[in-house]
């Protein structure tokens, strides 16, 4: 048995694996904490979303970062000089 909280395990899983479905996360938690009910996973995910640590993407998927719809480029030019 591990002393790491379910919430921490969920955050670490999503951080390591990217956007993940609740079913994948539940399977991973069961490996470390057998008999953990799915409703417990859902509750910890809801808390993480409420605290701004995860984003709900729909269809049971969660991710650490929401898509920035205002972004027009993925390129950064920190040292660019204007002429």
Image (cartoon, rainbow, N blue to C red):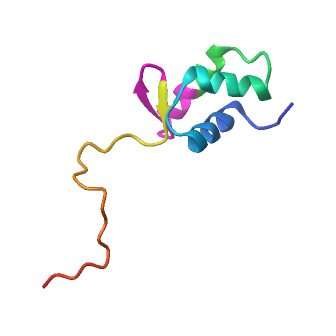
> Which sits in the foreground, 18 or 62?
18
| x then y, percent, for residue 49 | 48, 32
The quarter of the picture where residue 43 lies is top right
Write the start and end of the magenta stretch as one range.
Answer: 45-60
Q: Most extreme residue toward the right, as rendered? A: 1
Q: Is residue 56 magenta?
A: yes
Above or below residue 83? Residue 12 is above
Q: Is residue 16 left or right of residue 3?
A: left
Question: Is 8 located above or below residue 70 in the figure?
Answer: above
Which quarter of the image is occupied by the C terminus? bottom left
Residue 81 appears at what percent x and percent y?
22, 82
Q: Nearer the viewer, residue 11 or 21?
A: 21
Residue drawn at (22%, 52%), measured in percent from left and top? 72
Q: Residue at x 57, y 43 (%)?
A: 15
Can you tell which quarter of the image residue 30 is in? top right
Total labels: the figure holds: 0
Q: Is residue 82 magenta?
A: no
Image spot of residue 61 (x, y percent): 47, 26
Residue found at the very far bottom of the displayed protein: 83
Tell me where residue 3 appears, x and y as whole percent: 82, 36
Image quarter where the N terminus lies is top right
**What's the residue at 26%, 42% (across, down)?**
69
């Amino acid at each position: 048995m591990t002393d790491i909280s379910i919430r921490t395990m969920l955050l670490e899983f999503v951080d390591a694996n990217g956007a993940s479905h609740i079913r994948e996360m539940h399977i991973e938690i069961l490996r470390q904490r057998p008999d953990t009910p799915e409703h417990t996973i859902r509750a910890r995910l809801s808390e993480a979303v409420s605290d701004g640590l995860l984003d709900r993407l729909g269809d049971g998927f969660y991710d650490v970062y929401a898509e920035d719809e205002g972004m027009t480029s993925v390129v950064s030019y920190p040292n660019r000089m204007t002429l």
